Each structure stands twice: as C-alpha cells, then as structure tokens.
Image (tube, helix red, strand yellow):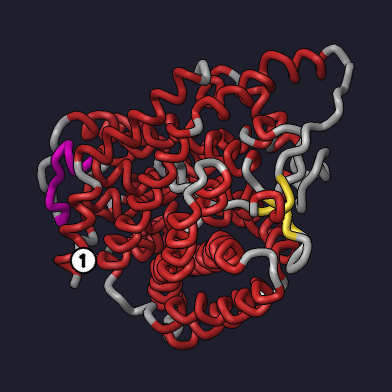
Amino acid sequence: MFRILTQISNILWGTPMTIVLIGTGIYLSIRFGFRYNFRKIKFHFQNTFGKMFQPGQGTGSVSGFAAACTAMANTIGVGNIGGVASALVSGGPGAIFWMWISGLFGMSTKACEIILGQRYRVKYNKSMDEYMCDRSFVMRNALGWKTGAVILAFACFILGPWTCCVQTEAVTSSLKEGFQIAPILSVSVLGLTCFLTIFGGLKRISSVMEKVVPFMALVYILGGLGILIMHITIVPQAFLLIFKSAFTPMAGIGGFAGATVRDAIRYGVARGLYSNDAGTGYGMIAHASAKTDHPVRQSSWGWGEVFLDTIVVCSVTALSLILTNVYIDYPNISSARLTTVAFKVAYGQAGGWFMAIAIAVFAWTTIIGMYYSCEKSVNYAFGDTEQNKLATKIYMIYYMLPCVLFYNIKADSLWAMTDILSAIYIIITLIFIYSKQKVIMDLFHDFWFRFIPEKEAGLNPEPVVFGKEESEYE
C-alpha cells in the first residue's frame, strides 16, 4: 500500500504539478501587480494583524480575524513541524528554499481563493444561521456544474477526515517521545476534546481558534528563536546551505542519504503547499463566513496567513533542524518526532516536553479547523434543510473515526495520501481561478482603484454585500 501511494504521489507531484502550481502563483502575482507579495505590505499588515481585535464591518457570521484563525488552524500546525521535517529529510536543506518560493507566490493564489469564497458564498437560514462557501458552492454558483458539485461534496466529506490521520500520528509519536504517554491514551483525549469543540459549531470553533492559535504560534516561534540565538554564529552558514542546496545536489553525509535538486523542489513545494494551503481551496471555505465590507479587503489574509505560516513558522522549524544537525544525526526518525528531538538536543528534556505539548495543541487545532472545511461539503450536499442538521451531527462522529482509529499508520504513508488529496484539490481550485479570472480581477480593480481612494477621501461608501440566500441559487 505504501509503494502504491508513493508512486501515485510522485506522479501527481512530478514536474508538471510543480510548474503549474508555482507558475499560477507567478502569473497571478503579475496580474495583481505584486500587491500580495511585497508591494503593499503595510496595507496588508494594517488590514490583518493590525485589526485582530476589531469586530469587522459588513455582512458575515464571524469577524475577519476569527475566520482567519479558523483558516490558520489548518495551516499553522503539524505541517509546520512534521511537514518541514519530512521535506528536509527527503529533499535536503534546499527544500526549504523552494518552500519559501511556493509561499511567496502562493500569497496571490490564496488571495484568489478568498475572493471567490466571499463572492460566491451563500446564507443558510433554515438549518443554520451562517454564511458559507466551499469548492462545491463555487462549482455550482460560478460555473453551473451542479452534478459535479454534488460528486465533489461527497468526495470531500468522505475523504477529508483521512488527512487528519497525519495529525494524530504526530500527536501520539511526539507525546510518546516527550512524556512516554501511551498512544491509546493520548489519542482518546485528543478525540474527545476535538469532538466537544466541533459540536459547538462555527461560533465555538472560531472563538476557540482566535484564542489558541495566535498564542501557541507565538510561543513556538519564541522557542525556535531561542535555538537560533544559541547557534547564532552558524546561522549564516545554515542559510547558505539552504540556498546552495536549492540549486545543487546535496551528497549523503552521516545518516542523511543525500538529495537531488528535483527532490528539493518536489518536497519543498509539496510540503509548503500542505503547510500554507495556497491553491487547495481551503482559503475560500474559512473566509467565506467573515464580516467584511469587500472581498478584496478580506483577501489581505492571503498575505497574512502565508507570511506567518511559511515565512516565519516554517523557517523557525527548518533552522532548528539544521542548526541542531538532527536530520543527519538521527536518520531513523522523521516527521514531527524529528523536530521534537531537535528541541531536546537544544533544551534538554524540557525541550522534548515543550514540543510534545506544542505538537499536541497544533494538531488539535488543525483537526478542528479541518472539520469545519469538511462540514461545508456536508452542508452543500444536504442543502439548507432540516436534514442538514441531522446529517451534520452524524458527520461529526464519522469525521473523528479515522483520527482516533488509524493513528498508528506509518507516517510516510500518511504524508503520501495527504499529497494525493492535496493535488486533487489543487487541480479543482486552479480550474475555478482560471475560469473566473474576470470576476476576480473586476473585484480587485473595483477595490484598489475605486474603493480605497474613496475611503482615503473620507466618503465612506456603503459596505458592499456579497453572498446570496441559498434559495436564490436553486
């Protein structure tokens, strides 16, 4: 099974997928005038992290920050810890450079997802008081592909929970490494607490995420910066190794088997994608519920999430692994457990305890954030009906089953399966983006060349309302 999954994953993540994904990011960055990359950093910062504690203006279900935290629950998690370690072990230090590249141009791709989610969202009134959107809503509302939308919805909510096995594997392995806690105990507590949170719906999920995600991310970043300070004299060498290995093969050394440039690109782009979700369509799901006066203003989080996730958190993990040399000294360890070992090397046993807790919390938030994404496919399949209420409750149980029952599958197999599903999601999302380029660019120009000047002039126009009642699409 592992060989089959790996072969499929390698085919999907071969040269064509890499070219398509990064090429799309470059193309969109050019079309946006690099506003989501480096030209309007001050504006994006003010409209994201600068407004974290403001309720938001316009129509929606939760604040823009709460929606972003729900999205970041998917992005800032085990992908930043286990995913980076997996990329480093398989692709060498050069994979980190290509992870940065995928993140830099992925900012524009993710902005497109958020704009589409806001533009084609719907309001459910009968079964739940909530604005929502996902790939199926866009497929039907934007392209009119009703049959395909139903098939996609069923595929997403059936297969989606299986990607969370990566999270539970990371939790059980790290807690065993840090505290010698039996996997059956840790996965039982994880499953119960996740279920109690998702049972409360969007309001409880977003409320928990906006408290836990920023705090845990800050604590983890500080822990990683401590390792950088301990090894400050060789930090320049670590960066040099990353840049050099991105363009030249790295020979085997110690327990590291070596890696080609192709390996660096393949694993860097794939793990970068899993970490920041740019191109998978998850961005349109979480941000569709946000209160905002314009879709393009909410799309600033396309910059904010990817910057925090890939440029900051992933870099902290990568440098911690390289500076402590664990990817060479511990050849039989990979995924999140390797990052745990790196912190133990730096801080002693206390570092292992810290990482065990960090990974457990990150995985916990990711499982909850992923549930919200999968639930939208259930909502689409059953519509704004009474049956939707019952289906949603039943689905909570189904969603948790793979997480708690299949935590002991080999990590490499789980990552291969996750890569396969991510590739499928990307293909679908890119079809949406290219098909609705005109809509995206019209909204983009409406905001940057009309809306912003009016705001600066103090005219304060009426908030733009996006999203229709579900019945209007029937």
Q: Is residue 218 above or below residue 448?
A: below
In the rendered image, which quarter is residue 385 located in? bottom right
Q: Is residue 263 magenta?
A: yes
Residues shaded magenta:
255-264
- Residue located farthest toward the right when viewing the structure as drawn: 459
The residue shown at (42%, 49%) is 317
Residue 411, visible in the rendered structure: yes
The amino acid beneath tag 1 is: Asn
Residues 131 and 73: in front is 131
- Residue 354 in view (yes/no): no
Q: Give the mark count.
A: 1
As displayed, is residue 410 above or below residue 420? Answer: below
Answer with left or right where residue 412 lies relative to residue 449: left
Give the crowd class for mark 1: few <14, some 14-19, many >=20 residues within 10 Å.
few
> Dot 1 corresponds to which residue?
332
Q: Tell me the quarter of the image containing the N terminus.
A: bottom left
Q: Residue at x 65, y 50 (%)?
A: 473
In the rendered image, residue 297, in percent from the top left (x then y), is placed at 69, 31
**Residue closest to the eye, 249 or 346:** 249
Query: Within the magenta stretch, is there residue 233?
Result: no
Who's the residue at 23% across and 61% down the image? 330
For residue 375, what is the image quadrant? bottom right
Q: Is residue 214 above or below residue 188?
A: above
- Tell me residue 291's x, y (percent): 76, 44
Residue 4 percent across, percent down from the top left:
16, 66
Give the quarter of the image for residue 337.
bottom left
* Front position in the image: 240 or 408: 408
Q: Residue at x 50, y 32 (%)?
A: 436
Q: Main secondary structure of the magenta part?
A: loop
Q: Please give left or right for residue 338 compared with residue 193 in the image.
A: left
Please state the horizontal and vertical placement of residue 164, each as a whole percent of the image: 44, 68
